[in-house]
Amino acid sequence: MKMENLPVNSLSLDFLTEFLISLEKLENDRGCRGVILTSGAPKIFSAGLDIMEMYGKSAEHYAEFWKAVQEMWLRLYQSNMVTIAAINGSSPAGGCLMAMCCDYRIMAENPKYSIGLNETQLGIVAPFWFKDTMVNTIGNRATERSLELGLLYSPPEAHKIGLVDQLVPEEKIQSMAAAVMSQWLAIPDHARQITKSMMRKPTVDRLLTHRESDIQNFVSFITKDSIQKSLQMYMEMLKQRKG
Ligand code: CO8
């Protein structure tokens, strides 16, 4: 699956809806046992959640958007397919979350790219299930430090802490992803799927149990004047940096 929502593959409501439909089609296709998730946008895997979906909109819109973000996580994290992220660009926040949902992460060795959950840098707080996904990937202490400081890691740093499994020269990323996919597909599906579910189910169940309150928390947090102001300042900073 090659994500292409130019310029930066931000996860808008429309994009998430398309993504979910495409993923479901593959999931229901008996001939498809694995997916490589990558980007068609130059230098960016995904810029994470579309900030414009979280700014200046109605409470109903925020609730609908958040439900779609939850759904993306639930489907991708629990996919029956082998999922490999071929991270061929920067991958902040929601982009990092998508990559962490996969079974294996390969990142291009480009010093300009970075990956991490940088929410605190925007003045917002990563939800508990973002945090849980990171804890399951890199452990508690590394997550605590990453989240509090909103750290974005270079490829070597991300590899060192286990946020990505492997680094490759950029031009080799797709062929390496295909080679890794072959290794994973050599394992009988049912054994691998049950094992994956055993590892991930407690984390998934936590969100399922608190799904409605998580939506309400998001809406009441994001509608606060102070949070709207932080997001506005962050968007302005992005635009100024560009200039
Ligand atoms: N959403 C919307 N627009 C974006 C986003 C985004 N996430 N990221 C970039 N853009 C826009 C920029 O504003 C710019 O717009 P314009 O052309 O109109 O000026 C355009 O995309 C291109 O961006 P850049 O010029 O910055 O492109 P670069 O190639 O220089 O850099 C980056 C690309 C590295 C992706 C950079 O744009 C960046 O760092 N973006 C911000 C990424 C980020 O911080 N995302 C966090 C989103 S929040 C999230 O995912 C989880 C939130 C959890 C919510 C919890 C609340 C309770």
Image: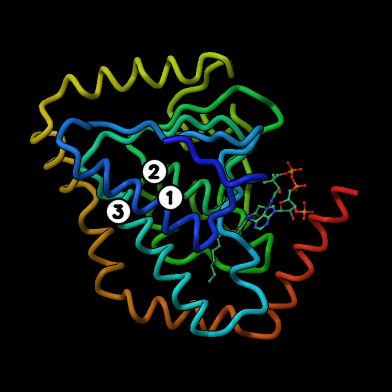
Q: Measure the alpha-carbon separation of dots 2 and 1.
A: 5 Å
Looking at the rendered image, the disc whose residue lies closer to the viewer, 3 or 2, is 3
- Circle 3/circle 1 CB separation < 8 Å: no
Image location (x, y in percent) of residue 84: 37, 32
Residue drawn at (60%, 22%), measured in percent from left and top?
A: 109
Q: Mark 1: give few (<14), some (14-19) or many (20+) Cα within 10 Å.
A: many
- Circle 3/circle 2 CB separation < 8 Å: no
Q: Which residue is mark 1?
A: 134
Image location (x, y in percent) of residue 175: 43, 14
Label disc, if present, on residue 71 of the rendered structure: none
Instruction: Please name the amino acid that badge 3 sits on.
Output: Arg
Q: Does dot 1 land on a helix, a strand or a loop? A: helix
Q: Which residue is mark 3?
A: 75
In this picture, residue 168 sits left or right of residue 176: right
- Circle 2/circle 1 CB separation < 8 Å: yes
Residue drawn at (70%, 69%), measured in percent from left and top?
A: 231
Q: Mark 2: give few (<14), some (14-19) or many (20+) Cα within 10 Å.
A: some
